[in-house]
Amino acid sequence: MNIQSKQPNIFRLFSTLIKNKRLQHAYLFEGAPGSGRLEVAKWLAQAKLCPNKDENALPCEQCSICKRVEAEMHPDVWHLKPDGLSIKVEQVRTIRQEFARTGMETSEKLLIIDPIEAMTISGANSLLKFLEEPVPGVTIILLTENEKQLLPTIVSRVQTIHFQKQPDDALVQHYIQQGIASEKAHIIAKLTQDTAAAKQYAASDEWQQWVACAWRFITLMLDKNSHALLYIQTDLKNIFTDRSHAQLFLRMLLIIYEDLLTIKYHQQKMIAFIPYEQQLKHYAKHLTALEISQHIASIFEAEKMLQANVAIQSTLEKIAIKNIKTC
Amino acid sequence: MKFSVNRLVFLDKLRTVQLAISSKTTIPILTGVKIEVSQEGIKLTGSNADISIEAFLETTDDAAQLVIEETGSLVLQPARFFADIVNKLPDETFSFATQDSFQAIIKSATSSFKIHGIDADNYPYLPDMDEHLAFKLPVQLLKQVIQQTVHSVSPHETRPILTGVKFDIGGGKLKAVSTDSHRLSQRQVSVAEIDHVEYSVVIPGTSLNELVKILDDELEEVSVIVVENQILFMTEDTYLYSRLLEGNYPKTDQLIPTETNTQITLNIAALRGAVERASLLSHAGKNNIVTLNVAEGILRLTGQSSEVGSVVEDIPYISMTGDPIEISFNPDYLKQALQTFVGNDVTIEFISSLRPFIVLPAAAANRVDFVQLITPIRTR
């Protein structure tokens, strides 16, 4: 899917801005991963740098410059990505030096920060200066999943563009067309909008295992069964080799709770964990909305703990203890 | 692409472009060296995005024994690895040929390497320079001007513009200024060849240090071209591109004092010796400070460290006029400033213990052509 079909509104908006040469110096792209944020950012970079623009000033996407932008090999388009968990002060310093210098190939430069929430507060603060006093020829594009997580001082200095999430059913259909089994597609559609990532999940055995584990863990907690704690010790703690896996696991837990709420309030929406529909209905009947929301709150808290480098095992144990106790 | 060439001549060019290549780069391809072969010869390119160096090896160069069979281009990375291979090849010459999927075959006598390369289309482009805009500068003079100013650039990125030397080129004059806000260096020379141009650029200090390295003392002149985003220094077989610093350079002209209350002329070697000895102790202390005392015909430099002890240097001088003064400053600044003077003697002019003092060549006609300014440190 290209950006034109993925985000038609945004494509139209920027086409007009490019044509009228009315691009701002800084944008905040808010949307889920896979919603086309990075593609649009790169396309804007091409629009600024491509030497063979068409009559509407749109980039050709064929020339060597456009291809190098696409491959992230252009020296005047900087991608600032987290080195590990966060964007380090050292990286911010390099960028500050880059800001002070003229471009290498032309005087147009772009900085894409992906994602801006990976920046430390002090790093983000040092960025403010550049957002406030635009350097001629520099365009800054910040990517984020959630505008609300950012410093208000940053948000107020940029123009926010919201990337719409594609409707779940359309996405599920799309994934099924791409050859992903229907029951997997329903869950994956909640996790990512990126086709490549979706295929990767669908093909991985690990991922299958996490889905099963997530379900087992949740049922133990909903049954107020203290074996949930043992389960972490015996199974869960060994299956995550990486912090990002644990984050994905927490997202799966959230999707199950979302399903519970969907069923409870008889919404006509699809649920994600279709194979477990009967059991979900059973739990939904016995749980109050307050209980479900407490569970959800515990997961949100766990997400924050993971971001703050708390060990995966302790994070999961905290969820389990909290939810078993609330009876 | 296919050619054979003298190993040492090629290695020499490779070493030149390697000056620009660093292992820490924003885009990975810049750790490599770009090799372009045309009918005229070989062009090697190395870059760290800030500076880029191109070196040429022409077929007309007899020592190079260059034979070109097929043109083409390739990027080999990392460059250091390629240089190590060329360095260790057994024969006097080697041949270089590319195969499908960007592989290079390097052969010399009995040895044969197969190296994976990258499509040269992915390598950043350097701006096209219009050679008509070129103006010429004498190499010796340019090197001298750089060496007399580059030590004062700021190492800190807090004010990025101060990490460069500001060059005003035009009206028959070349003026270079640098400051880190504690000291300032200014050098102005007359160059007849730059009568018709008018440029004002700030060149990063790091680029200038590399430029000094590649400018051969035997060269007469270097051609310079300035475009919007880069400056290019061209010698016959080597091009150095540098990106420029953007922003407003502070106005420095009014910082150089026009008056003086105390003047001392003295021998550079004598002063430098004293400063270096005094700084031995000041370096040991928490504050890197020495104090200069001018009173009753004695010029005395003192330095101390509360842990180690103290030093007193009575410095011989040639002449001394004006009021007595006591002034404290960072000895390293004076030491570095003194290294930039070519003659035997310098004149130091003071106003008061809290105002900057300047170091000039002895018997200087004015205070603008060559001046090193140092701000004092307030002590209780």
Image: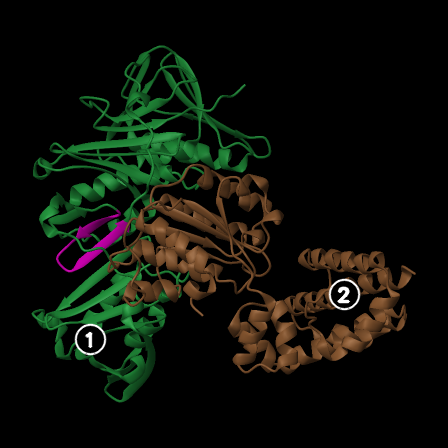
Chain colours: A brown, B green
The secondary structure that most of the magenta stretch takes on is strand
State which quarter of the image contains the N terminus of chain B.
Answer: bottom left
The image shows residue B86 at horizontal and vertical percentages of 28, 75
**Does B16 lie within the magenta span?**
no
Residue type at the position of mark 2: His
Above-or-below relation of A1 to B241: below
Residue at the spot of label 1:
B72
Q: Chain of mark 2?
A: A
Q: Nearer the viewer, residue A191 or A289?
A: A289
**Does B232 lie within the magenta span?**
yes
Residue type at the position of mark 1: Gly
Q: Are marks 1 and 2 on the same chain?
A: no
**Residue A294 located left or right of residue B311:** right
Q: Nearer the viewer, residue A224 or A78?
A: A224
Q: Residues within 10 Å of mark 1 (few under 14, many from 20)?
A: some
| Residue at 30%, 79% in the rendered image | B102
**Residue B281 located left or right of residue A120:** left
| Residue at 27%, 31% in the rendered image | B186
Above-or-below relation of B57 to B52: below
Q: Magenta residues?
A: B229-242
> Which mark is in front, 1 or 2?
2
Confirm whether residue B25 shows in the render: no
Confirm whether residue B128 shows in the render: yes
Q: Secondary structure at mark 1?
A: strand
Q: Secondary structure at mark 2?
A: loop
| Residue at 90%, 61% in the rendered image | A325
Q: Nearer the viewer, residue B323 or B205?
A: B205
Above-or-below relation of B157 to A260: above
Residue at the spot of label 2:
A266
